[in-house]
Image (cartoon, helix red, strand yellow):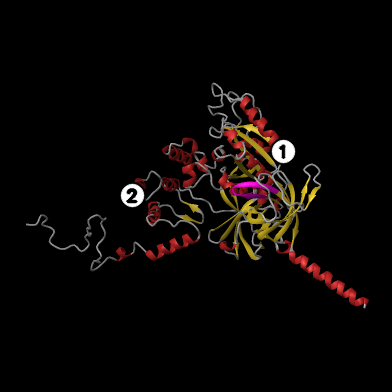
């Protein structure tokens, strides 16, 4: 007698069991399948979506998440959006609560998705605004030695200004605590990749934005490790103000400022990149190794660090009125947004970091100069998108521009600027704005960092030869003609060669001390003719300083800084010689 009297017939829909594998549905199809059973999965559509997402450089959405979207829509069936209006839903509805609980148990619903259904909050589309109605835009770059606290200060400012909400901060705190790195929770607002979070080191220039009552700010969080100095240069070239973060902790300050430390190098690079104002944030004042009994901040240690830094920074080129020192604690947030409590720091009575930034006079904006927009980053997002700082001129929506040096005509389809409420679409971008643009007429692969957008009637002429004055900062041996290194100018990174050493200048008088030297060495100020391996878009320093100053690097070290004196085009010289020869022949013929 069978154990189950009811099982008298073969079930064609039963699962096939294979030892060591999960259950899989039987291959056979029921004789008369219901119409609804054929429709759940459309593999062609999924693979097409994955292909499209891969093309634009983003990870494809996992297949398991697709039903979640449908179920979320079904669970919020009372939610209908029409013409931008949304119906309110009762989050205490028992049917809705049961459906949400079931989806969460199945792993198809995240916490933020559940909150979105309950509150029914959706991100509004980017609205077009007149740039004149926006607050003054300021770009800040945080620089300094590795582990000085740059990312922590940047992230804490984002949190204090409301750009990172409480729930996200609690999530970062839980994740950091699980990895026994509680002090990194604010840094994770800026360090978004798994590798950066695992090692606690910023590798690329992080980007964020926040707004105060006076201004709209873009934060550029530069990496401090010497292996990522090129990313730091890219961030500093877009900045109006630099914040040099110094760790006051004993041993850390000395390591950052001594030879080979990044505190010293970053200050020089920031000045060369065009930063006019430098704020020195002396961080970690609450560290047990330096604070006094009762958690009081140590004025003696602060003055010691300030006394070492101030003469060096003045020698670097920052005048006294462009330097400002203040004590801060990036982890506790003291003296970042609100002034430090006098109970723990009675000897500092100045403004907090954000108060000082709000009081700063805006840097010069070049409205009346020809358009210059160096491309600092590029990506694909339903088209070709570029990012960077608009150095001079204005850009209007829909106008046609030229990408140099490859002379490709492009049309500006959209202009975005970061705002506290997300990306805002503009009709016109003003000089100094850090913007994103969607371009039509060029592929992302055709662009390189350092390409420049111009107008047809005022193009920047690419060149491969120029004369420049170079200050040799750090090089162990002598440098002769034929030496090659890497040149950083605005957002371009190109290889160059010392083609000819023209003269060595006297440091005090800046007059020629020696003509046609055979070599130059560390400490020399030398006039050099450079040959670029590829054409670059540059300007004379006296015409436009932002595209006429550069840095030289070799084997991971900054060996020199310089400014461009004159641009050379061999084809012009050849044409000039041919013209002179033609004139000479004409005069000879006339004399005969």
Quarter containing the N terminus: bottom left
Q: Is residue 485 left or right of residue 382?
A: right
Hey, which residue is sitting farthest left in the picture? 1
The one of 125 and 384 positioned closer to us in this rendering: 384
Asked if residue 32 lies in the magenta stretch, the reply is no
The one of 273 and 118 positioned closer to us in this rendering: 273
The label number, if any, that marks residue 106 in the structure image = 2
Crowding around mark 1 (Cα neighbors within 10 Å: few <14, some 14 to 19, many 20+) is: few
Tell me if residue 303 comes above or below residue 368 in the rendering: above
Picture quadrant of residue 282? top right
| Residue 12 image position (x, y, % from top left) | 20, 64
Image quadrant containing the C terminus: bottom right
Q: Which residue is mark 1?
A: 315
Q: Secondary structure at mark 2?
A: loop
Secondary structure type for disc 1 = helix
Compared with residue 573, is residue 376 higher up or lower down, i.e. above or below?
Answer: above
Residue depth check, mark 1 versus mark 2: number of the one nearer the observer: 1
Give the residues in magenta.
Answer: 551-561
Q: Is residue 457 visible?
A: yes
Name the residue at the top extreme. 293
- Image height of 189 relative to 502, above or below: above
Residue drawn at x 45%, y 39% as measured from the top left: 176
Is the stretch drawn in magenta largely helix, strand or loop?
strand
């Amino acid at each position: 007698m069978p154990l189950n009297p009811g099982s008298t017939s073969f079930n064609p829909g039963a699962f096939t069991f294979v030892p060591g594998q999960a259950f899989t549905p039987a291959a056979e199809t029921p004789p008369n399948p219901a119409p609804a059973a054929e429709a759940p999965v459309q593999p062609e559509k999924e693979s097409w979506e994955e292909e499209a997402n891969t093309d634009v450089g983003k990870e494809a959405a996992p297949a398991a998440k697709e039903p979640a979207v449908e179920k979320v829509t079904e669970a919020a069936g009372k939610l209908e959006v029409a013409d931008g209006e949304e119906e309110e839903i009762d989050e205490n509805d028992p049917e809705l609560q049961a459906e949400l609980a079931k989806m969460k148990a199945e792993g198809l619903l995240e916490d933020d998705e559940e909150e979105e259904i309950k509150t029914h909050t959706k991100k509004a589309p980017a609205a077009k605004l007149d740039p004149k109605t926006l607050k003054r835009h300021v770009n800040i770059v945080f620089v300094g030695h590795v582990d000085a606290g740059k990312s922590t200060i940047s992230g804490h400012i984002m949190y204090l200004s409301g750009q990172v909400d409480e729930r996200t901060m609690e999530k970062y705190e839980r994740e950091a605590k699980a990895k026994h790195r509680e002090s990194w929770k604010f840094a994770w607002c800026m360090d978004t990749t798994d590798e950066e979070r695992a090692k606690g080191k910023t590798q690329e220039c992080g980007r964020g934005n926040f707004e105060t009552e006076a201004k709209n700010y873009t934060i550029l969080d530069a990496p401090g490790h010497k292996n990522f100095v090129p990313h730091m240069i890219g961030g500093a070239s877009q900045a109006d103000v630099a914040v040099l973060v110094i760790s006051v902790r004993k041993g850390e300050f000395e390591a950052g400022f001594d030879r080979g430390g990044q505190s010293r190098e970053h200050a020089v690079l920031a000045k060369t990149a065009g930063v006019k104002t430098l704020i020195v944030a002396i961080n970690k004042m609450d560290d047990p190794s330096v604070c006094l009994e009762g958690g009081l901040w140590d004025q003696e240690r602060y003055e010691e660090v300030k006394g070492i830094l101030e003469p060096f920074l003045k020698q670097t080129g920052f005048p006294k009125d462009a330097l400002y020192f203040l004590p801060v604690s990036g982890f506790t947030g003291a003296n970042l947004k609100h002034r430090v409590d006098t109970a723990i720091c009675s000897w500092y009575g100045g403004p907090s970091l954000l108060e000082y930034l709000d009081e700063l006079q805006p840097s010069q904006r070049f409205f009346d100069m020809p358009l210059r927009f160096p491309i600092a980053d590029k990506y694909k997002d339903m088209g070709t998108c570029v990012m960077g700082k608009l150095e001079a001129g204005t850009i209007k929506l829909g106008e046609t521009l030229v990408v140099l040096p490859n002379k490709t005509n492009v049309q500006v389809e959209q202009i975005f600027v970061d705002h506290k409420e997300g990306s805002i679409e503009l009709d016109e971008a003003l000089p100094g704005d850090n913007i994103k643009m969607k371009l039509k007429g060029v592929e992302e692969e055709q662009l390189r960092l350092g390409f420049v957008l111009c107008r047809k009637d005022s193009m920047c002429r690419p060149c491969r030869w120029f004369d420049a004055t170079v200050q040799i900062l750090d090089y162990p041996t002598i440098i002769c003609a034929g030496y090659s290194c890497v040149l950083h100018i605005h957002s371009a990174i190109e290889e160059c060669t010392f083609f000819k050493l023209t003269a060595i200048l006297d440091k005090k008088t800046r007059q020629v001390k020696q003509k046609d030297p055979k070599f130059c060495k560390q400490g020399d100020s030398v006039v050099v003719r450079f040959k670029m391996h590829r054409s670059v878009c540059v300007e004379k320093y006296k015409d436009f300083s932002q595209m006429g100053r550069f840095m030289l690097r070799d084997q991971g070290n900054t060996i020199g800084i310089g400014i461009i004196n004159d641009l050379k085009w061999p084809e012009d010289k050849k044409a000039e010689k041919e013209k002179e020869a033609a004139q000479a022949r004409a005069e000879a013929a006339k004399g005969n």
